[in-house]
Amino acid sequence: MEDTEPEIENFNSETDLLKFTQNICNICENIMGNCGPFLKETIYQEILIHELNKQDIKTRRETVIPYIFNDCDGCKIQLGNNHFMRTDIDLPNIKCILELKQSTSSIKDEHTWQLRNYLEQRTDYSSGIIINFVNKFGPSTTPTVQCKLLVKTENYVDLETSNERQIKIKKYKTWSIESKPYVEKNEIFEDFDIV
């Protein structure tokens, strides 16, 4: 029997893409619920790949992308000297990048820009999701999973440089969701009753 690649899965609407993102967030919420907070990002990555493969979603881990940019004359150049980007999980049949974080704070601007830069280098990919396993207990916080979807649009914003050069910068749509919080720390750890 011949092993063939499955067809590229296209989302028929923004609603389908949002549902897919919600599904990813739900999977990650279950991972945190089953395994707990404060694990290494690579452990969450391995478990997420396992869960996606169970749903017949093809994955590729740690895909290396070369840096290709336009120089000041608009000519493409590829950087060498070990300069490259590495995505956490690629979903090649969905044309989506999953970028995982494990932190003690919310998704930061630099995470959004990192994924945007990956998508700019992957002209064949149209979307990406930042998945942030927030591991922090505090007076008003418990661990949670945040997901932020970035989707390329066909729209651009014009940047006019000091020397009056016009540069077109692609616009993106974003959508953020968050899982239900993990249980409180004091529900897990109890003090001994010392008599």
Image (tube, rainbow, N blue to C red):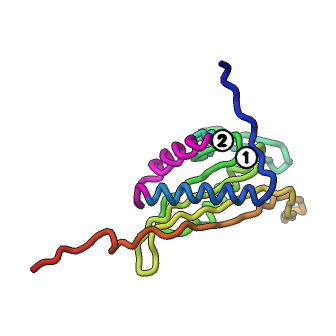
Q: State the image quarter where residue 164 is shown.
A: bottom right
Coordinates of residue 168 in the picture (x, y in percent):
86, 58
63, 77: nearer the viewer: 63
Q: Which of marks 1 and 2 is nearer the N terminus?
A: 2
10 Å neighbourhood of mark 1: few (<14), some, or many (≥20)? Answer: some
Q: In the picture, which quadrant includes the C terminus?
A: bottom left
Q: Can residue 175 be seen in this view?
A: yes
170, 18: nearer the viewer: 18
Q: In this view, does 8 lie above or below 164?
A: above
Which element type, helix, strand or loop, lies under badge 2?
Answer: strand
Q: Give the range drawn in magenta.
A: 34-57
* Relative horizontal placement of residue 89, taking residue 8 as reference (left or right): left
CB of mark 1 within 8 Å of CB of mark 2? yes
Q: In this view, does 157 lie above or below 94?
A: below
Residue ranking furthest to the left: 195
Which element type, helix, strand or loop, lies under badge 1?
Answer: helix
Q: Residue 65 carries which label?
A: 2
